[in-house]
Image (cartoon, rainbow, N blue to C red):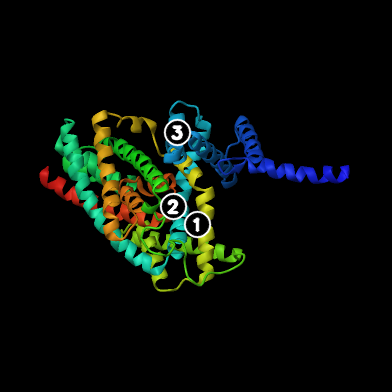
Amino acid sequence: MTQHNIAASPPQTLVKVFNYKVGFIPLPVYLLLLLLVAGIMSVKKIGTDLPTMIAILGLGGATCAEIGKRIPYLGKMGGSAIIAAFLPSYLVSINVIPQTLVEPITSFTKSSNFIYLFVSSVVVGSIFTMDRNLILKGFAKIFLPLFIGSILAFIIGGLVGLACGLDLKQIVFFISTPVMGGGLGEGAIPLSVGYSEIMGIDSGKVLAQLLPVILVANLFAIIICGFLNMIGRRYPHLTGNGQLQVTGDNLLAGNKQEVKGTIDVNWVISAGMCAITLYLAGVLLHALFGLPGPVCMLFLAVILKLSNLIPAPLEQGAKTLFQFFLASVTYPLLFANSVAVTHWSELVAAFHPTILITIFVTVATLALVGFLMAKKMGMYPVEAGIVTACHSGLGGTGDIAILTAAERMTLLPFAQISTRIGGAITVMIALLIFAQLS
């Protein structure tokens, strides 16, 4: 009897111990990884190979997620995403994260571009498992709140900026436009190049002026959408819990011909290869026609879905792929980008009260218009507000951080439309007007 208890006890104890997690990593594995990474750092053997980076980024992302979750009030407003997106940048600035770690993380993040693997997998998982009718109606419905929200954001943000003593030209072209420009690659960089050519100055100086604005705007969007998530919890009738439109269907319900039983891993692999294929198609279309690659990838996925070319097992495989990336890659991705891309000094540069107020009002107007117009458009207010707020997102990374804070990653396809297409139109119109005024 005693021997039986001794034999049976350790497995049960292990199960309990492994149920304690830091972020998404079981506590025993987390502690062991910490020791191993510390050991590798001490012998100066940190490489940019995939296994090492998975360990380091996994540790960083899980730690930030756990810290953010435990901060009172902030934890309920997307604290995990906020901490993962900004705390590492601050720690780099004060050398708590040493350069021996920063350099390989930066090299890996920029060379691997694994954000595109994440976006591809999440977009495929979202689109392939949506109801076909919801796709058509959802994309069509979101454009009107997005358009009206953008106009009002310019007007209200401009009036508030003027009241704070800012110059109208500065507000419109150096605050509101970069906020809604679609992030860094699609927004701030094209704007800086365009502005510099028109004004005859160095584009680097212009970019340094725009970067803090888009970083702070993304932070406000994360907080606002985290607050919308809290509203959804308090008032369930205002949210579809990730479903944009008011219907009886679930956004991720997929085909009615649902596969029962265990999902064949081969279909998950197939969904992953579909994601890679669509990503490469977007890269090629970008090279040939200059169209934004992620948007091309998104529309190709929509076309496949609307053409009824996605079999039910592949839909289920895509759903599993989506859930895997959502659970295990989100926070490591935010951590990596915070270390490699987000510069704390640039973020702090925008911490002037008048600029902060103007940015906040601009982002809040986008979210509020989506929220208030939702019912008339047949959408859920919380989800519509989140999607329109993504117009101020910092590109793909920003959308991920915003939707993570809002616990609405299923909205990523709509967020991509809001950020990228809305951003491209904003940048194009702003440059045309700026050229006429200069």
How many tags in the picture? 3
Label annotation for residue 409: 2
Q: Which residue is mark 1?
A: 322
Mark 2 vs 1, N-terminal side: 1
* Neighbourhood count class around disc 2 (C-alpha, 10 Å): few under 14, some 14–19, many 20 upward: many
Q: For marks 2 and 3, give the one nearer the viewer.
A: 2
Secondary structure state at the residue bearing disc 3: helix
Q: Closer to the camera, 401 or 45? A: 401
262 and 212: which one is in front? 262
For the C terminus, give its image quadrant: top left
Q: Are marks 2 and 3 in contact (CB under 8 Å)?
A: no
Nearer to the camera, 268 or 263: 263
Q: Amino acid at mark 1?
A: Phe
Q: Residue at x 80, y 46 (%)?
A: 8
Query: Where is residue 21, by image quadrant?
Result: top right
Distance between mark 2 and mark 3 Cα atoms: 22 Å
Q: Residue placed at 27% from the left, 53% from the top?
A: 422
The image quadrant of residue 313 is bottom right
Q: Secondary structure at mark 2?
A: helix
Q: How far is mark 3 from mark 1, CA to CA?
A: 26 Å
The amino acid type of the residue labelled 3 equals: Leu
Whichever of labels 3 and 1 marks the residue nearer the N terminus, that label is: 3
- Position in image of residue 225 (x %, y %): 37, 45
Callout 2–callout 1 Cβ contact below 8 Å:
yes
Q: Which residue is mark 3?
A: 87
Q: Tell me the kind of residue under disc 2.
A: Met
Q: Name the spot of residue 7 as percent of width and height, x first.
A: 83, 45
Tell me, yes or no, if residue 340 can be seen here: no
Is 326 or 293 nearer to us in this picture? 326
User: Where is 172 relative to 278, above or below?
Assistant: above
> Where does residue 327 sit, x and y in percent of width and height?
53, 49
Asked whether, in this view, residue 165 is left or right of residue 52, the answer is left
